[in-house]
Image: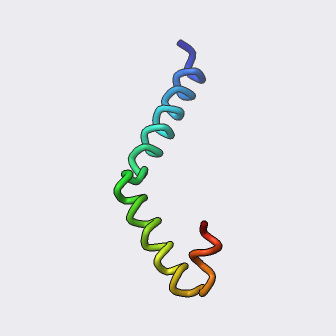
Amino acid sequence: MSQTLRNSLIALCTLFLSATVFAASKAEIDANVAATLTEFYATSNAGQKLAQ
C-alpha cells in the first residue's frame, strides 16, 4: 500500500471517528429542542401559531 493511500485512509478514519464522538444523543437533542421551543413561545406572542 502506498504511503499516500495509507495516510489518506488514516485521515479519513480519524475524521469519521472524531465526528461520531461529538454527536448528541436523541435525548439530548430532544431536550434542546424542547428548551428552544419553550423560549421561542415565551418571547413571541404568535410563537405557537407560527410553529404549527
Q: Is 1 on the left or on the right of 35, as rendered?
A: right
- Location of residue 37 in the rendering, given as x and y in whole percent from the top left corner: 50, 73
Residue at the spot x=57%, y=15% of the render? 2
Colour basis: rainbow
Examine the image and state in which quarter residue 7 appears: top right
Specify the quadrant of the image occupied by residue 27: bottom left
Report whether 49 appears left or right of 20: right
Please tell me which residue lies in front, 35 or 20. Answer: 35
Q: Position of residue 44 (x, y in %)?
A: 60, 85
For image coordinates 50% across by 40% down, the residue present is 15
Q: In this view, does 17 lie to the left or right of 12?
A: left
Residue furthest top as drawn: 1
**Residue 47 position within the rendered picture, expressed as x and y whole percent measured from the top left:** 60, 78
Location of residue 4 (image quadrant): top right
Q: What residue is at 62 percent from the left and 74 percent from the top?
A: 49
In the image, residue 14 above or below residue 51: above
Count of numbered tags? 0
Q: In which quarter of the image is the C terminus?
A: bottom right
Give above or below for 31 relative to 40.
above
In this rendered view, identify the residue nearer to me: 44 or 23: 44
